[in-house]
Image (cartoon, rainbow, N blue to C red):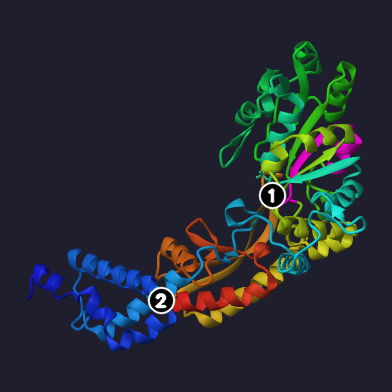
Amino acid sequence: MKSQLDRLREIPAVDTILNAPDLAPLLKARPRWLVVDAVHAVLASLRQEIQAGQDLAAGEMALAKLIPRVEQAAEEMGRTHLRPVVNATGVVIHTNLGRAVLPEEVLHQVVRVASHYSNLEYDLSRGARGTRYAHVEDILCRLCGSEAALVVNNNAGAVLLGLNTLAEGRKVIVSRGQLVEIGGSFRIPDVMKKSGCHLVEVGTTNKTHPKDYRNAIGEQTAALLKVHMSNFEMSGFTREVSRREMVAIAREAGLPLMEDLGSGNLVDLSAFGLPSEPTVQESVRDGVDLVTFSGDKLLGGPQAGILVGKKTILDRVKKNPMTRALRVDKMTLAALEVIARIYLDPPAAQRQIPALRMLSTPLSELTARAQSLARCIRSLSDDTWVVDVMEDLSQVGGGALPETPLPTCVVSLSTSGMSVNRLEQAFRAADPPVIGRIRHDRFLLDVRTIQDQELETVARVAGKVAALSR
Ligand SMILES: *Cc1c(COP(=O)(O)O)cnc(C)c1O
């Protein structure tokens, strides 16, 4: 038997592989640096296999065996890093998986605008310089019922910009119960500090009363802030000051009230059988001076931070130099304008905007979809696989309605050929990756967030995983 050292010595040199006639087609098709990297990667893993004491089959070091491995490695390295995945987690607004999926017509408009010059900052009627924000302001005002609107890079930026404009160097009053951390290191107290304003906390963790705000208002107070608690809910012995009460307190004191709504919902979710989430329109109607929300959470659009409210305040925000640093891209504006136009017809919004469609899909339809997927998977796997259809719960995600159970139907998988963790990993390693969840030692595919045209893909991936497990 050969020693480990002998086997390591048998590994061919990088140049031997690069000069092999059989590698020529790959070198022609791909940049040389990539092929060289692929050769290094294959040799490194070969070295690792030998050092780990793996019993390599005879001929494993032959060029005929190595070149296909190099081709495979080059293929993987040549693929874009950012790529589509199938979301089978059932979390509709999944921040790790890119949040909202955009409708087709939105993408057409992005391609149309981005592949040509456009009137981004050009007023076509006057033949003079215009502003990029004008394309969406009117329509956002119409949807939200506000006097003015502005769009920036994301909601964290919108909050930062709003606070900086209203209160730099001065004090902002917030209820202690609303000093939340949203995740991804967005904490309200930290954002306030960065905006240059001073936080004044009032009330206690569970209770804040109107008098707490009134007593805290002083010379140095610049604004009152209300924050949506997002992925956090309090119950029991609690008291929050309602939005209307806060408007009244702010008016009495002649101060502006700002509200960070987080998700930024424009439709009445109770129509889908969900608890009602505050809408942007309600916030504006109640008299909040400046409202901020995300474009890619419940709204179902591109990443953006939207500010709506009183014209006098938005005029100040627009003049803030920070606005330029948080400026939104033309592709985002193109997408947001189409999304906003879809919202002008609410039934169309429910049909066309994937986030809303996924949230409102009836259980009967989810059940039928899960059954058809389960049938497909059964036909592709063998009797070591247990494929069931079960009821379970999806999540809205994106910080909205964290405690709301969303009844759904899942395909539940397990097999004697693979542990549940290996199963999860094999689906995740597939092309395209399929991301599901593990519960009670079963791998679950929630059909709520799988799009119709992806069902076939998921079945195909399952077939490949089944072949692996044999
Ligand atoms: C999500 C969220 C934010 C941050 O919004 P991004 O669009 O992710 O920047 C801010 N505030 C609240 C309450 C949120 O839920």
| 284 drawn magenta | yes
Q: At 54% from the left edge and 78% from the top edge, which residue is drawn?
A: 460
Report the quarter where the N terminus lies. Answer: bottom left
The span shown in magenta is 280-298
Are the two marked residues, 2 and 1, in contact with CB atoms closer than 8 angstroms? no
| 29 drawn magenta | no
Q: Amino acid at mark 2?
A: Leu
Q: Classify residue 330 by image quadrant.
A: bottom right
Furthest residue toward bottom: 21
Give neighbour class at mark 2: few <14, some 14-19, many 20+ (Cα, 10 Å).
few
Q: Earlier in the sequence, mark 2 or mark 1?
A: 1
Q: Amino acid at mark 1?
A: Pro
Q: In this figure, which residue is indicated by the disc labeled 1?
A: 405
Q: Quadrant of ligand 1?
A: top right
Q: Is residue 373 left or right of residue 126?
A: left
Point out residue 34 in the picture as x, y percentages from the top left corner.
39, 71
Reply above or below: 150 against 249: below
Helix, strand or loop for disc 1:
loop
Q: Classify residue 261 by image quadrant.
A: top right
Reply above or below: 199 against 405: above
Residue in front for this viewpoint, 145 or 234? 145
Q: At 70% from the left edge and 42% from the top edge, which residue is drawn?
A: 324
Reply above or below: 288 against 295: above
Q: In this figure, which residue is indicated by the disc labeled 2?
A: 468
Point out residue 427 in the picture as x, y percentages from the top left corner.
49, 68
Q: CA distance from mark 2 to mark 1?
A: 35 Å
Point out residue 142 in the picture as x, y percentages from the top left corner.
92, 49
